[in-house]
Amino acid sequence: MWRMRGMPVRDGQSPPDNCVKAGVDVAERTCARSSSGFSSLATSLFKMNVNIGTAVLLACISAVASLRADECEVCIGFLKKVSQTFTDSEKSNPKSIETRFKEACLSSKGKENRFCYYLGGLEESATGILGEMSKPLSWGMPVEKVCEKLKKKDAQICELRYEKQIDLNNVDLKKLKVRDLKKILNDWEETCDDCLEKGDYIKRIEQLMPKYMHGEL
């Protein structure tokens, strides 16, 4: 017999919607922590009412589904970095997680700043889905699974990828495209207002190299 908020449901009967919802919620929390959770829960479903068993099983399968290797790169990377700043008490507190996230967003740049914008971590963010990130993290859900859930809310989140870093110690500047040369200057927060030709950008970078690569040259 299933019981939810004092409402009995006899074996063979369909459980109320709130019972199914609770079962799905438990499945997401349990299965998302590890794939072994799927096996143990799937086994127990044989003893369940078919309707709720199917709902929970589908939720569990969804929870353990894996992302492709090239998906959600910025989401995973940034959330892992932010998670390392949590104290033991903050790890299980959604509001504290959101506070830490917003603090990290203040100094974010590039694609990470864009990720913050999508989630609502910046003052100028148009929308906010911070709860979709903070609650699962507070349950102990791995960041990969959190990002997978966020992807369902906004596909743009998992389209963000880090820009490939240019190894200036082993690259021939003449073989780079102008946009790559501009990126180097942008990463250094430098400008080249008088640069018109590719050679101008190369000359500017070579002038600045001693300043930014003195420990690597």
Image (tube, rainbow, N blue to C red):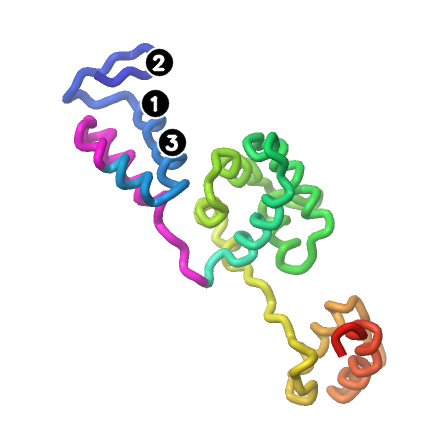
How far across and how far down the image is residue 19, in percent?
A: 31, 23
Q: Is residue 187 left or right of residue 44?
A: right
Residue at x-position 59% and y-position 40%: 128
Instruction: Report the quarter where the C terminus lies.
Output: bottom right
For label 3, the residue is 25
| In this rendering, the label closer to the viewer, 1 or 2 | 2
Residue type highlighted by circle 2:
Arg
Q: Which residue is mark 1?
A: 18
Q: Is residue 173 left or right of residue 156?
A: right
Q: Which residue is disc 2 drawn over?
A: 5
Direction left: furthest residue: 12
In the picture shown, does residue 184 fall above or below 152? below
Task: Indicate yes or no whether the magenta region holds residue 36.
Answer: no
- Asked if residue 166 lies left or right of residue 8, the reply is right
Tell me the crowding category of disc 2: few under 14, some 14 to 19, or many 20 or more residues within 10 angstroms, Cα based. Answer: few
What is the quadrant of residue 180 in the picture? bottom right
Residues at marks 2 and 3, CA–CA distance in whole angstroms: 16 Å
Q: Secondary structure at mark 3?
A: helix
- Position in image of residue 158 (x %, y %): 50, 55
In this rendering, position of residue 133 left or right of residue 85 = left
Q: Position of residue 4 (x, y in %)?
A: 32, 16
Q: Are marks 2 and 3 in contact (CB under 8 Å)?
A: no
Q: Secondary structure at mark 2?
A: loop
